[in-house]
Amino acid sequence: MEISFKGRTVLITGASRGIGKNLFKAYSDLGANVIGTTTNDKKYGNKNLLKVNFENEKSTNSFYKKIKKIKKIDILINNAGINEISSIQNLSEKSLKKIINVNLLAPILLTKIISQKMIKRKSGSIINIGSIFGHVSKSQRSSYSATKSGLEGFTRAASLDLAKYGILVNSVCPGFVKTDLTRKILGLNKIKQLQKEIPLGRLCSSEEVVNLVVFLSSNKNTYITGQSFIIDGGFVVK
């Protein structure tokens, strides 16, 4: 049985770059009606991306009103996320609230809104894009790890609330992914050093993350829910 999303509507947050952009293309190629979000006004292919800044309450509330008007959303991918490097002693309350709003509050509220649409149809799939930093961490990642760990707990709890309606809720937790942003932040030398710490000896590609997300939200998955899938080349178990 081939995977197809014809007739299904997918909402992907953070769809203008990185993993989100690749997810947008993959679902579009597989026949889905895809709705994406971006912090900028732009188009991707022939699809409009809705502008929203999850850091801003006014922008977020306006976006939620638009989403509530959409009759059917079959799949929700909570992908948007931010990270700010800071030691706990230097962490500002403003920065903490911003990261919580984007990485944790937005996925929770979107799940609340969209699951109500799914409940009426007694089907749906919700995928939260977490991180290995929800399972392990390093210095200067306290706020990021807190939100990603929180997203894992939310995934488990939401899956129990929604299971009786046939709605599956899972999370995918990438390790170090080969994106333009990763290359910009780490640089070539640090990436080479990092690859030595990964048992498979390389960074993860966006396509590998996309393949897992697509499978979990497809008709090939009818029984997996409440789970967190780490895709990191063996980094956390070495």
Image: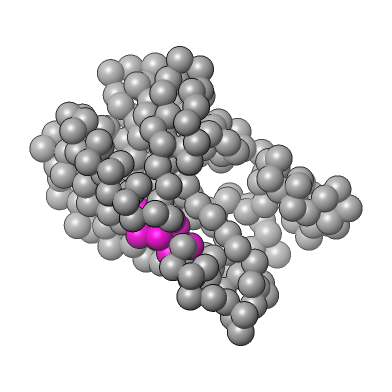
Q: Position of residue 211 (x, y in %)?
A: 53, 34
Q: Position of residue 168 (x, y in %)?
A: 29, 45
Q: Residue at x 58, y 36 (%)?
A: 17
| Residue 4 appears anywhere in the view | no
- In the figure, 30 relative to 211: above or below? above
Q: Position of residue 167 (x, y in %)?
A: 23, 44
What is the magenta range?
99-106
Q: Quadrant of the N terminus?
A: top left
Q: In the displayed structure, does residue 122 sit left or right of residue 18?
A: left
Q: In the displayed structure, does residue 160 sit left or right of residue 181?
A: left
| Residue 71 appears anywhere in the view | yes
Q: Residue at x 41, y 36 (%)?
A: 51
Is residue 103 in the magenta section? yes
Say how many tags the image has: 0
Q: Quadrant of residue 138?
A: bottom right
Q: Nearer the viewer, residue 165 or 44?
A: 44
Q: Position of residue 113 (x, y in %)?
A: 21, 47
Q: Quadrant of the C terminus?
A: bottom right
Q: For the stretch drawn in magenta, what is the main secondary structure?
A: helix
Q: Nearer the viewer, residue 16 or 145?
A: 16
- In the figure, 22 relative to 98: above or below? above
Q: In the displayed structure, does residue 208 sit left or right of residue 79?
A: right
- In the figure, 230 relative to 137: above or below? above
Q: Nearer the viewer, residue 109 or 136?
A: 109
